[in-house]
Amino acid sequence: MVTMEVYKKYFATNYEESRAAFRSHLEKIKELWPDAQLTTEKIGQEKDNTIDMIYSEARTTNDQVLFFTSGEHGIEGYTGAAVIHLFTDEYLSKLNPETTGICLIHALNPWGMRHFRRVTENNVDLNRNYFLDRSSVPVDVNKHYENEAALFLPAGKITSLKAEKKKLHAQLVKALAAEGYSGITEAKGMGQFQFEKGVYYGGAFEEDSAIFLKKVQKKLLQTFQRIIHMDWHTALGPSNEITMVMSEIDSREAEEMKDKYGLKNIQKFSPHDVKGDSTNYFHEIKNQDFPERYLFSALFEFGTFGTDKKAELREFMTIILENHLYWDGAENEDDIENILNEFRAMFYPVDKKWLQDVVKQARLGIEGVLRGEELL
C-alpha cells in the first residue's frame, strides 16, 4: 500500500521543487555509474527555465541504455518527474551498470511545467514538433481542423463560463454534423500548423526543446546497441491506469506486446494520423541512419478523465477553455479558477487516490518493460 509519506515524497508542488529533487538523484546514480554527469540546458526567453539531464555510458560495454523522458507536455512533467524519482529509489540498483547506460531527462518543456500549461511559451504542442522533413507536411494538412477553426480558436474575453460552455457545445454539435466523429477526432489528434493561437498547434519552426531532444536521440543511437525509451505523460486512457502508446512503425501487434510486457492497455497510432510525434521521429531516424540498432520507444500515459464519450467531451472542453483563457482572459475570478482547476484535474490531479495509483501503475509499467527487454 502506498503511504502518505511516499505520496508526499514523489509529487512536487512547483517546477523548482521538482527540478531540485531531480538534480539530487545524481549522487545516488554516481554510486553505480561514477562517470554520470548532470547537464542543464537553458530553454526559452524566461530566466532559469532549463532541461536537466543525468547521463552516463555503461562502465564496460555499451550494450544498452535506459532512457526516460518527462515534461514534454509541461504540466505532465510533475508526474514524469515523480516516476523518475520512484525509479531511482526502487529500480536503479537492479540494473547492470557494466553493460547498461542511463539517461534521464527532466522537463523537456520547462516553461510549460513552470506555468502549469501543456504547451511551450510559443503555444506549441511539443509532441507535434519533430520532423525528418518539415516541408513534407503542408501547413494546411489538418483539413478537419481548418474547416472547424472557429471551434478551436479563442474569440474574445470569457464573460460567463456557463455561457461559453453552452456556446462550445453548440459549436461541437455543428462540427460533428459537418465533419463526423472521426473527423473531429482526427482534427484533435493530428496536430495543426496554421493557427498559432489555436489548440494542438505544432509550430512553424523547430522548438529549442525539440532540437535538444533530437541531439540526445542521435547520440544514444550512435553510442548504444539497444535503446529502451519510456516517455512519461498523463491524461490519456482509462482513469487511474497506465496505457502504453506505440507508433505503428513498431510492427508488433498490440496483443503480442501485452504478453511481452504484461500490460493490459496498449494502443498503436499511425504517423499518417499523428504528425510530429517524438517517439515516431525516434523510430524514423533510427531506421534511416541506424538500421542495425534496436529501439523500444513508447509513451506511457496515466489516465485521468477516462475513455467514454462523456470523458472525451470533457477533455475537449477543458483544452479549448484553458487556451481561450490564456489568450483572452475572463471577467470572473471564479470562472478563471474553475477553468484552471479543471485543467489541473486533467493533467495533474490533486486527488490523492490518483497520485497513489500512479505509483502503483508506474511500477507495473517499469517492471513490465525492464523484464520484457531483459534489463532486470
Image (spheres, rainbow, N blue to C red):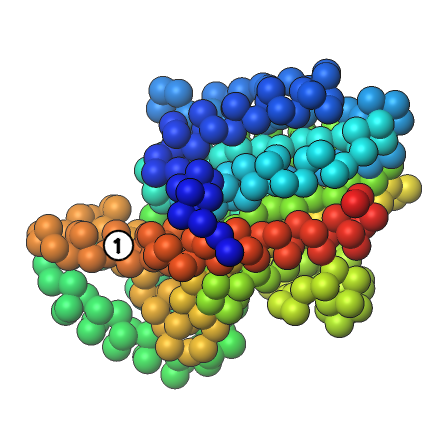
- Residue type at the position of mark 1: Asn
Residue drawn 36% across and 20% down? 47
Is 198 on the left or on the right of 31, as rendered?
A: left
As drawn, 282 above or below 36: below
Residue drawn 26% across and 54% down? 341
Residue 200 x/y as whole percent: 44, 54
Residue 238 x/y as whole percent: 51, 69
Q: Nearer the viewer, residue 166 or 110?
A: 110
As drawn, 257 above or below 297: below
Q: Nearer the viewer, residue 266 or 94?
A: 94
Residue 165 x/y as whole percent: 22, 69
Residue 182 x/y as whole percent: 51, 76
Residue drawn 81% across and 33% down? 96
Q: Is residue 4 visible?
A: yes
Say which quarter of the image contains residue 190.
bottom right
Is 175 on the left or on the right of 260, as rendered?
A: left
Residue drawn 64% across and 57% down? 364
Q: Quadrant of the C terminus?
A: top right
As drawn, 334 above or below 209: below
Q: Which residue is mark 1?
A: 341
Is 358 on the left or on the right of 274, as rendered?
A: left
Q: What kind of element bears circle 1?
A: helix
Q: How many marks?
A: 1
Q: Nearer the viewer, residue 368 or 8?
A: 8
The local crowd at label 1, few if under 14, some if 14 to 19, many if 20 or more residues have their Cα within 10 Å, is some
